[in-house]
Image: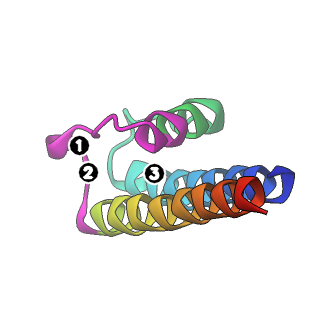
Amino acid sequence: MIPFLILLGITVFMFAVIQYELLIIKSKTNPKLKPNFMQTLGAQYQILYGENPDAGSMGPFQWCNWVVFSVSTVIVSLNLLIAIISDIYD
């Protein structure tokens, strides 16, 4: 179970870095936008538990990042569930 939780944490961190980089690129055209990595990491954590981002503030690359993150966390979580059930069955 621990390896799956580590993988889930790495996945959240990796997508937070991608989202942060996308915000840095977006802040070059909008000087009011001040990206903060901890807020981005918190937002990715909230997305993990079903919080949907604001539709108006996201660009096409951020939407693509959100879709890939949502799908990958579901796959990792299902693998965790299968591992727990197979461990109990053994």
Whole-percent x and y of residue 16? 58, 51
Answer yes or no: do the residues labelled 1 and 2 have beta carbons within 8 Å?
A: yes
Whole-percent x and y of residue 45? 54, 37
Q: Is residue 37 left or right of residue 2?
A: left
Which residue has dot 1 on it? 57
Under circle 1, the secondary element is helix
Q: Is residue 30 left or right of residue 6?
A: left
Q: Is residue 8 left or right of residue 59?
A: right
Whole-percent x and y of residue 15? 57, 58
Q: Earlier in the sequence, mark 3 or mark 1?
A: 3
Under circle 3, the secondary element is helix
Above or below, 24 relative to 86: above
Which residue has dot 3 on it? 23
Please provide the residue range marked out in magenta: 44-60
The numbered disc on residue 90 is: none
At label 3, the amino acid type is: Leu
The total number of labels drawn is 3
